[in-house]
């Protein structure tokens, strides 16, 4: 079957774009092999297209040229848009990684601060505390004495501060009072009251049935309390265990005698209470 020249000329644009069937391509190639005129038209159509075409006899080629320009423009716009979007996300990911890296680096170089000098008490406790230690996650420290006076016999004092990313505090103070001051202090602590605390962080109570004398407990931030000091007359120990996110980031057992801790207290990382609260 031999195609007429008119049909071949109509099919040449599609032939040039490889948009014809295999059978049509075979017939067109057979025709071009025999027809010099159509072959010349085909070769001309396959030549580079000028930027601007004004000849009326190449209208179809000009339409295809415009379509190619639009496709190239669309591809260029798409590539520019994709590059801009990628740059935006890369910038924000880099920023996020930088912040995370800074936090981790800051945490890695944070050190535990320990102060056992009772003369520094006002730096960490009460209304005169330095800004860094004044607001301990909103915990009420009024159970502790406002200040240490000359008539108070301080047996031991320790303040522990750690702030890798969330501030954490551990303090205890043991004071022996005169008989009258001891009774007055018991009355003051009775006014502070005892908030519910059992089952927080596994706590079941204290070794002395009379303890705690006073307790401020929070199911998220920890405890501030006062207890009788074993085998010491007219002596009270004040303790604060204040942290964040249901756990200490330090080994708190290294910094406080075990007899000052509530029975069952567990604020280590991934403690059972933390796991249960996060599931709830």
Image: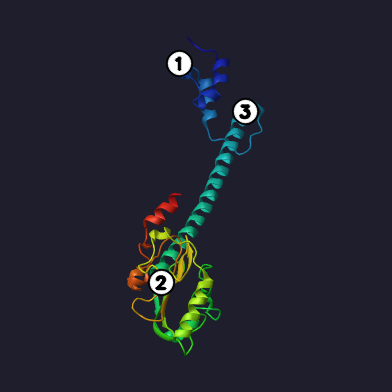
Looking at the rendered image, the disc whose residue lies closer to the viewer, 2 or 3, is 2
Return the mark for residue 58. Answer: 3
Please determine whether, in this image, residue 77 is positioned above or below residue 216: above
Residue at far top of view: 1
Residue that numbered label 2 is attached to: 110
Q: Give the quadrant of residue 8.
A: top right
Residue 260: x %, y % from top left: 37, 72
Q: Give the quadrant of residue 55.
A: top right
Q: Secondary structure at mark 2?
A: loop
Q: CA distance from mark 1 to mark 3?
A: 26 Å
Q: Earlier in the sequence, mark 1 or mark 3?
A: 1
Residue 245: x %, y % from top left: 45, 60
Residue that numbered label 1 is attached to: 23
Looking at the rendered image, the disc whose residue lies closer to the viewer, 2 or 1, is 2
Task: Please state if 108 lies on the left or on the right of 151 as rendered.
Answer: left
Count of numbered circles in the view:
3
Visible residue check, residue 133: no
C-beta proximity under 8 Å, tags 1 and 3? no
Q: Secondary structure at mark 3?
A: helix
Looking at the rendered image, the disc whose residue lies closer to the viewer, 1 or 3, is 1
Q: Earlier in the sequence, mark 2 or mark 1?
A: 1
Visible residue check, residue 171: yes
C-beta proximity under 8 Å, tags 2 and 3? no
Residue 56: x %, y % from top left: 67, 28
Q: Residues within 10 Å of mark 1 (few under 14, many from 20)?
A: few
Q: Residue at x 51, y 26 (%)?
A: 16
């Amino acid at each position: 079957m031999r195609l007429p020249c008119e049909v071949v000329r109509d099919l040449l644009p599609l032939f040039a774009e490889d948009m014809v069937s295999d059978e049509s391509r075979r017939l067109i190639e057979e025709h071009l092999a025999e027809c010099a005129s159509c072959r010349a038209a085909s070769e001309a159509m396959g030549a580079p297209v000028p930027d601007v075409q004004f000849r009326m006899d190449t209208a179809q080629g000009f339409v295809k040229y415009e379509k190619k320009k639009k496709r190239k423009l669309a591809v260029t716009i798409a590539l520019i848009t994709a590059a801009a979007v990628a740059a935006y996300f890369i910038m924000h990911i880099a920023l996020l990684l930088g912040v995370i890296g800074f936090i981790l680096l800051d945490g890695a170089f944070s050190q535990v601060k320990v102060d056992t000098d009772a003369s520094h008490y006002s730096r960490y406790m009460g209304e005169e505390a330095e800004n860094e230690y004044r607001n301990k996650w909103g915990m009420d420290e009024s159970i502790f004495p406002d200040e240490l006076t000359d008539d108070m016999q301080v047996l031991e004092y320790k303040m522990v501060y750690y702030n890798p990313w969330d501030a954490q505090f551990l303090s205890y103070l043991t004071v022996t009072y005169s008989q009258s001051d001891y009774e007055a202090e018991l009355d003051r602590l009775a006014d502070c009251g005892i908030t519910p605390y059992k089952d927080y962080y596994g706590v079941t109570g204290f070794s002395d049935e009379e303890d705690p004398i006073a307790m401020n407990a929070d199911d998220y931030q920890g405890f501030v309390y006062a207890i009788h000091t074993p085998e010491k007359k007219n002596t009270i120990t004040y303790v604060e265990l204040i942290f964040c996110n249901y756990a200490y980031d330090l080994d708190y057992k290294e910094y406080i005698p075990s007899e000052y801790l509530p029975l069952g207290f567990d604020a280590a990382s991934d403690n059972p209470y933390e796991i249960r609260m996060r599931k709830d």
